[in-house]
Amino acid sequence: EGLSHLLAAGEISAAIELVAQYRYRMLNNTQWLRLDRWLSLFAQEVVESSAELCMLKTWLAYHRGQWAELPALLQHLATITEGEPNKKIADKLAGEISTLCSLLAYHNGDTEGVISQARKALDLIDPELWIVRILARVYLSGGLQMIGDDNGSYSALYDAFVEEQVQNRRFK
């Protein structure tokens, strides 16, 4: 409701901030339909120019299985996050981008890319966004298994029960 009011008042920046504020919670709770509805309220040019909204668009493409679109979306995201003045926001988004790059590397058989991108993601992603951290850990585990490091592969997953600050039953 607040988002609709902000958009009706022409407060686009405030509306983007509102979506950014609740995006993690909605991703963690797999509220894909609601996120899609929120994104559809913005003009396409606003989505394309906002790093937060473009990241949301990219996660929705991932969720829908539109993986062929991910490389172009990730390239666009990398370009617009370079201009992000807030380093903390840029780093958070870079972590999310790295998670999806790890996924693509895995499916392309790029073992080195899987491991390096997943590790980078885990260094940058906010602990609050545990659903994306899980995905990064899954691909890190898979990458380590691809190179024959079974102990490292298992550790990538099971160490999370100790290392991750935010957990719940779905995480486990």
Image: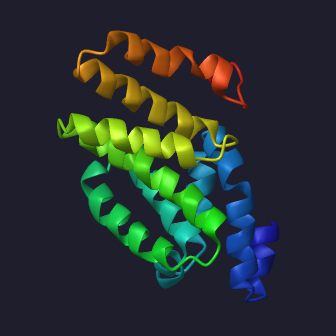
Q: Position of residue 126 (x, y in %)?
A: 65, 47
Q: Is residue 172 visible?
A: no
Q: Residue drawn at (57%, 50%), measured in percent from left and top?
A: 33
Which quadrant holds residue 168?
A: top right
Residue 57 horizontal side relative to residue 64, left or right: right
Q: In the image, residue 131 lies at what x, y percent?
A: 58, 36
- The coloring applied to the image is rainbow
Q: Is residue 100 left or right of residue 20?
A: left
Closest to the observer, 41 or 66: 66
The structure residue drawn at horizontal position 28% and vertical position 44%, both measured from the top left corner, is 104
Q: Nearer the viewer, residue 35 or 102?
A: 102
Outermost residue, left side: 109
Q: Is residue 155 above or below residue 50?
A: above
Q: Residue furthest bottom?
A: 10
Q: How many marks?
A: 0
Q: Residue, x 44% and y 54% (percent of image)?
A: 97
The N terminus lies in which quarter of the figure? Answer: bottom right
Residue at horizontal 34%, vertical 35%? 115
**Where 7 sits versus 52, above or below?**
below
Residue 110 at least partly seen = yes
Q: Vertical placement of 64 versus 89: above or below?
A: above
Nearer to me, 38 or 100? 100
In the depicted view, which residue is nearer to us: 167 or 26?
Answer: 167
Percent coordinates x, y for residue 148 in the rendering: 24, 15
Query: Which quarter of the rendering shows the C terminus?
Result: top right
Quadrant in the rendering for residue 38: bottom right
Using the rendered view, name the quadrant where residue 90 is placed: bottom right
